[in-house]
Image: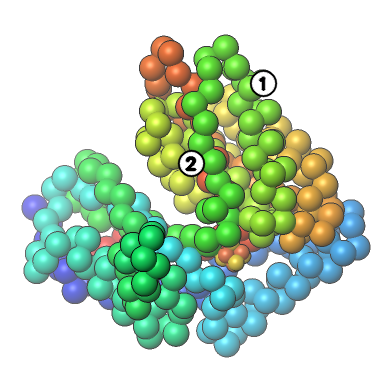
Amino acid sequence: MKEIHYQDIVEEVKEMCKKSNTNLGEDVYSAFRKALKTERSETGKEILAQLIENADIAKAEQVPMCQDTGTAVFIVEVGQSCHIVGGSLVDAINEGVAKGYGEGYLRNSIIYHPLNRKNTGNNTPAVVHIELVEGEHLTIHMTAKGGGAENMSDLKMLKPSDGMEGVKKYILSIVKEAGPNACPPLVVGVGIGGNFERCAYLAKKSLFRPLGIRHTDPEIAELEEELIIEINRLGIGPQGMGGSTTALDVKIEVESCHISALPVAINLNCHASRHQTITVN
Ligand code: SF4
């Protein structure tokens, strides 16, 4: 059985938090550049150029690309033959987040309680999802998830008879309703199936797939492509100022569900689509 040390996880998570906020992923950066060539509105082009410049400055000066440095959300694949020594996995992640947000001078956005609103002061606790998998590896996926886009996300238990058309209509209505509030251009994460809570998780998980990578199921891949076109026809555009780039990508994850149900969740991600993946050895 492989041993992975608590402190190694802390150090990796700390660096992930800093890097995700300052170095925009190559996939998102390339999507900005591609959109700059296809965007039809002059204002939209200007905003995309500013987003590229913003990402360049953030990287060069190692400053956050947005003042909202997000909720630290993790999906951790834990190999069933891997043993974490020196402390618990969740504690290690939270310690890494606290250190990363502190050292990186990143805004602390987490409060103790949704009603008393007192800040915890170190951006913890993180949201941690654990998936037990085969093998002895520990792979950590992290996103610094912006609050504005999260607030415009939605979940609905559709009727099975709503079918594919109902799903598309619902997704388009949520993106339309979000308008400028989710900080477009967006990455639209969609979960279809599972049950109430599982479907929200699928939508979140879909956002960890790099931009431009389609679902392995050709039917779902086709739906993703169709929705990118339909969403970009809404005319919301970069920062909601009008234009043909409302979504940089659409990601869908699908799972089996009950015969009576058609759960659909939409987790919107803003243009600061920050995700990192590392494997701790
Ligand atoms: S939703 Fe995204 S772009 Fe908007 S303020 Fe939050 S992190 Fe920044």
Q: For this view, does 138 lie left or right of residue 189?
A: left
**In the image, is the residue at mark 2 within 8 Å of ligand 1 by its beta carbon?**
no
Residue 145, visible in the rendered structure? yes
The mark that comes first in sequence, 2 or 1, is: 1
Task: Count residues near mark 1 (Cα–Cα under 10 Å), then give few for <14, some for 14-19, many for 20+.
Answer: few
Provide residue 174's location: percent of width, then percent of height. 64, 40
Looking at the rendered structure, the kind of residue marked 1 is Glu
Residue 131 location in percent, x, y?
Answer: 27, 44
| C-alpha distance separating marks 2 and 1 | 19 Å
Labelled disc at residue 9: none
Q: Is residue 60 left or right of residue 117?
A: right
What residue sits right under mark 1 in the picture? Answer: 165
The local crowd at label 2, few if under 14, some if 14 to 19, many if 20 or more residues have their Cα within 10 Å, is many
Q: Is residue 275 left or right of residue 60?
A: left
Q: In the displayed structure, would residue 40 be above or below residue 109?
A: above
Query: Is residue 208 shown above or below 51?
Result: above
The front one of 46 and 265 is 265
Instruction: Answer above or below: position of 36 versus 64.
Output: above
The residue at 38%/59% (across/down) is 114
Q: Is mark 1 within 8 Å of ligand 1?
A: no
Pick the front one: 280 or 140: 140
Q: x and y percent of residue 171 in the render?
A: 63, 35
The one nearer the camera, 116 or 94, is: 116
Is residue 26 in sight in this rendering? no
What is the secondary structure assignment of the residue under circle 1? helix
Q: How many numbered tags mark residues here?
A: 2
Q: Are marks 2 and 1 in contact (CB under 8 Å)?
A: no
Q: Residue at x 39, y 28 (%)?
A: 194
| Residue at (22, 61) in percent of width and height | 90
State the residue position of label 2: 203
Secondary structure beneath label 2:
helix
Q: Which amino acid is tagged 2?
A: Ala
